[in-house]
Amino acid sequence: MGSLTLRGNKWVARWVVNGKIHVRSTKTDDKALAEEKLKEYTAPTRLGSEAEALEVLAVKIGRRKAEVAKFEDSKPAIEIISGWQEYLDQHNRPDSGEATLRQYEFQYEAFSKWFLDNHPKTGSDGVGIRYELRHVTQDEADRYAGYLLKKVSASTFNRHMNLLALVWRVLKKKARLSENPWESIERKRFKVRSRRELTVDELGRVIAAAQGEMKLLLAIGIYCGLRLGDAAALDWGSVDIAKGIISLVPMKTARRSQKRVTIPIHSTLHAMLAEIPREQRVGPVMPNLKARWESFNGALARDVETLFLSVDIKTNANALTASEKAAMEQAKKDGKELPPLKRAIGRASADCGYHSLRHTFVSLCAAGGVPQSVVQSLVGHGSPAMTQHYTHIGLETAKHAVALLPDVTKEPELIGAKSESAPVAKAALDIAALATTLTNMTSKSWKADRDKLLELLGAASVSV
């Protein structure tokens, strides 16, 4: 900082830099002014020293940080084998439903098994290697993606990649991950193929072949249009036999909305449910199938597809129906060679499955002339805006609509037969459409709705 010495009537500044003494007059006898001069003279030296000190300190801090980082890096992080449980334990993960989490777990475990199967179990010292998430490099991720593409469809591949990217993103901080190798893998384009609806004849065949709870599961799909998970998990608390309705919140929309769907019970389904003894109407409607679906939902879906194939309903291009298998076996016995079946390259997309019954329900309703708004209300709509639009559908209107569906448990030749009750059903249909039109009428649409009402009334009078 230097010092001041009074020489004569003037203050003299003195300071030392690197052992060299510097002396300079302040040219003032005012000590306060002299102190300001001293600060001015020594400022360059002070600033240079501070800069050097800060540089030294910065180097020390950098070294310390590197030591801390090295120490932290040496500590164990999340292992691949325990990655899924770590993901479940994180509060910042998406709030996925149980069925989604089971699918996620399957996808994660598929990668975990592949990685551990393709890397040494022990090191050169014979000690087991603990592979961690941060050991998965971009090259490793690319290798797994290439392996997976040979096994699954493009849409399934994308779901696997999205799940792994999500796990890495959620565990980034805790697993000390420097990159997310799954995000850079390009997702594949694919065509969405909707499952086709079944014909009435096919419905009759598959219902006739089904036994026990499987027959009831199929009837629920045909007459309620429920998805497999909702049908398999159906609880007696959602079934009111006395009122003739099934009311539940679909799993697919439960996380976004608690909007219920209320479905009238068709007479055929009502008879099947009524056969179950009253004392057994507690808990799951189909306890065995619910347990099978909860253990692995894909197993129950395969059971349905196997049943379809047994009655010659082809589920995908590469699946063999019972008739095709029998023909191949007979040809082999006779020493004949059948023309090759047309098969899809790689994994074939599903054409028929349990979800086909949902399409069938909608198709049968449409074929019977049920208004689209009634159908939308019965199957439940995923969009909140559309759901709100269809809340005006009354229960009586819905009952008339469901009553029109054919009884597929009858003999195939009787399913489409005319009966004396047919005109009544037709009139009920027109009344349902009439009620819908009246409810939808607004000040802007009344003219168009008036013409529609006159048309409906005329059709009803003719049918009666």
Image: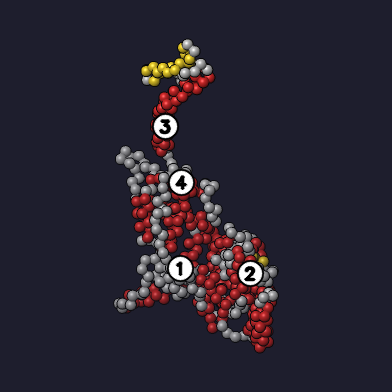
Badge number at residue 170: none
> Residue 132: x and y, percent?
41, 44
Q: Is residue 50 visible?
A: no
**Earlier along the polypeptide chain: callout 2 or callout 3?**
3
Q: In the image, what residue type sits under mark 3?
A: Ala
The residue lying toward the viewer, choosing from 374 and 28, is 28
> Residue 238: x and y, percent?
64, 63
For the residues marked 3 and 4, what is the alpha-carbon distance in whole angstroms? 28 Å
Q: In the image, what residue type sits under mark 1?
A: Val
The residue lying toward the viewer, choosing from 238 and 376, is 376
Near mark 2 (Cα within 10 A), the count class, few <14, some 14-19 or many ≥20, is many
Question: Given contact means CB atoms under 8 Å apart, are the residues at marks 3 and 1 in contact?
Answer: no
Residue 364, above or below 298: below
Quadrant for the C terminus in the image: bottom right
Q: Look at mark 2 in the image and give the residue it sits on.
A: 390
Q: Look at mark 1 in the image and give the residue it sits on.
A: 192
**Earlier along the polypeptide chain: callout 3 or callout 1?**
3
Residue at point 39%, 73% (across, down): 325
For the residues marked 4 and 1, what is the alpha-carbon distance in whole angstroms? 33 Å
**Earlier along the polypeptide chain: callout 2 or callout 1?**
1
For the residues marked 2 and 3, what is the alpha-carbon distance in whole angstroms? 67 Å
Near mark 1 (Cα within 10 A), the count class, few <14, some 14-19 or many ≥20, is few
Residue 441, above or below 152: below
Q: Look at mark 3 in the image and give the residue it sits on.
A: 58
The residue lying toward the viewer, choosing from 61 and 395, is 61
For residue 366, side relative to residue 41 (left or right): right
Residue 419, above or below 113: below
For residue 215, side relative to residue 75 (left or right): right
Badge number at residue 172: 4
**Earlier along the polypeptide chain: callout 4 or callout 2?**
4
From this viewpoint, which residue is outermost toward the top?
8
